[in-house]
Every structure is written in structure tokens, then in C-alpha cells.
Amino acid sequence: MEINKYYKDVTTFIYEDLAWGPLYRKKDGEIIKNADNNAEKYISDSLKILSINKADLKGKKIFNIGTGRESRFFAQHGAVVTHLDIGGESVKEVREWAKKYNFKVTSEQGNILDKDIGENKYDLIFLSGIYQHIEKPAYALVKFINALKKNGLMYMGFYRSGEFKYFIVDSIRHLVDYKMVSEIRDINSILFSFGEVNHYQSSRVMDDFFVPKKHNFHPNDIIHDVKLLGGDVFHFDEDFRDYNHKGSDYFSIGGDRIYIKKLSDKITALKDVKEQLKTIKGKNQIEDVDYQEEIINHNIRLIKKIKLLCDTGFITKTSIACLAIGLYQFTRPFVFEESHYFNESKRLGRHKIINRYLQSFINNHSRV
């Protein structure tokens, strides 16, 4: 399948039918340890950094992309919300909800790159888990900053290059293909989500493994583009390391959340900055990062060997599906404390135990 050709259709299918849509179209998520699963909690945390009280949201014009749960939060606190989602079902649910409770929400279906969202229009743009999945993110950033009023604010969370978990996810994405979607969904649901396919852990797998675009950004590149377009970064945790795979924390490195203020009412034309933008695409974590540790580079070579063995028929697709789900347990198990893989990697070292796992897989599950 030519994923770039079918970007919109596949992205819609993943989010509307397989991942977050079935969970979040009608409600917010529960609070789950080690996860940004509850929108009310992480929005409230971000509003504190933005110095916005919930009472201050009344009458504010807010733009939001996603399943609709964030838009519902803002509308419930009196904001005038413009909601966009690539999936039609989410838009339908938001419209029906807003009509039922008489909230001020305009909801539209579409790809942000095809939409005119206006200029000098919004007091706040809130983007959580969105930027990294846009086909050409920097082109959308031009629209976002143009759409902010002077002194308007934007929160943007993004996938951080240098995160251990995205090293694992990019390794998995190197191994799997779209013919495995159904099988991986079934295997994972049986092993890790009580046989349920519309489950938090199943949604994470579908999202991380198969969403067409998954960009990882170094904060230097994000900040460069924000400043180029007339934005000011007023809150950031200053973690500019290229990578950090040490420790056992859920987030291995900082610098994945950024808070922006637009300094003027200036409008930037995409054609004038197109060649200067740095976040048109992100960094693949097994191709584009210069790792100093030999064991990390050895693990990359093993991943590529396993892919070759699969492509030449020496390892089955089903074995690859199982390996991918197993690799995921090193970084995103549903309950860390109960994961044997996670605890062994914490005891012996992340890449050391991954190395053992990959070597054992080749030795015991290939026909070489």
C-alpha cells in the first residue's frame, strides 16, 4: 500500500475505527498511571502554565484538533470552540453533543493542510498529540500561528526525538506492515487488553504501530520554526539533549511540550518561509540519530537483520507480529509494575535486555 497516497484515508481509519475514536468520541478517558489519558487533567495542568483560570475561558475563541474530548472541556467552561478532526464520526458526535447542551462549538471534518482556519482569530490553540501526525507539520504550523491573535497563546505537545520509547516504536514500525494490522490487533488484545479491541492499550498499539505519519522532533527544530513565524516560546523545560535512553522513567527525556505566544498580528506566507522550515518532517529514531553507545547501534543492526530475514521468508509474519508486541512491553506496558520485560530492563539495562531479546528471537525463531 502506498501510504503517502492514502494518508487521509488510512489516518481516518486508524483513529476513527481502531484507536482513540471509539474510546474518546463520547467521553474523556480515565486517569491511568504513567499516561496522559485524561484530557481534563492535562488541560488543567497546561492552563496553569498558560496562566489561564478556567473561569477566564468564557468567551475565549479556541481552536482544537482531535477526537473532541478537549473541545468539550473548553466548551463546558464557556469558550467558543472551533473543532477539527480528520474523522467524520468524531465531528458527528461533537455536533450532536453541542446541539444537545447548547454549547458554542463549530465542528468540521478535514485535513488541516486543506483547511482555511483564518488569521488573527483565536485566543488559544490547543494541540495535544496532533503535530507529529500531520503530513507536513511545518506547513500547518504556519496556519496555526497566523490564526492566533496578537498575544494569543498556543500549547503544543509533540513526539520528542531522543525518547527511548520512540526508538522502540520506530524499530517496530521498521518491522511491521499494513497486512499485519488485524493480526497484531487480535494478538495484542488477547494478551494485554482482556480480549477487548476498544481498550486503552489496544488503541496505543494501533496508533504507535500504524498511523501513517509519526514524526519525532528535536526541540531546536520546533523552536526555530516557531520563532521564524513570529512566535515567542515563553515556557519550555530547556532539555536540548540529542537523546537519553537511560533510566526507567516513562519519559526518558524532556522537551516535548512547548508554550507559545504570538508577538504581533503579522501574517506569514508559506511560500516566503517554505525553504527555511525545519519541521516539515521529523527524525526517524533508528536512522537519523547519531548514537554513541555500541549496544544501541548493535540493536539497530539486529532490527534490520530481522526485517531482512522476514522479507526473505526466514521469519514468518506472525512471528514478527508477536515480536513487535513483545518489544512494546519494554517501554509502554499497560501496568509497568507487572511487566516482566520492563522489570528486567530496569534491573539489567534497557538496551542490554533488548539485545538479549532480539538475539534470542533470531536464534530461536528464524529458519537460518
Image: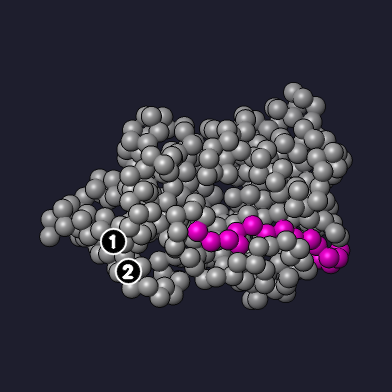
**Quarter of the image containing the C terminus?**
bottom left
- Seen at 73% across and 70% down, the residue is 227
Residue 94: name its quadrant.
top right
- Total marks drawn? 2
Crowd rating for badge 2 (residues with CA inside 10 Å; few <14, some 14–19, many 20+) = some
Q: Which residue is mark 2?
A: 295
Q: Which residue is mark 1?
A: 355
Residue 143: percent from the left, percent from the top?
72, 59
Residue 138: percent from the left, percent from the top?
64, 64
Q: Observer-nearest residue: 339 or 20?
A: 339
Relative to 59, residue 100 above or below: above
Q: Is residue 2 visible?
A: no
Q: Which residues are magenta?
A: 252-268
Residue 139: name its quadrant.
bottom right
- Disc 2 + disc 1, Cβ < 8 Å: yes
Secondary structure under tag 1 reads helix
- Seen at 54% across and 49% down, the residue is 8
Residue 158: percent from the left, percent from the top?
59, 57
Q: Observer-nearest residue: 357 or 20?
A: 357
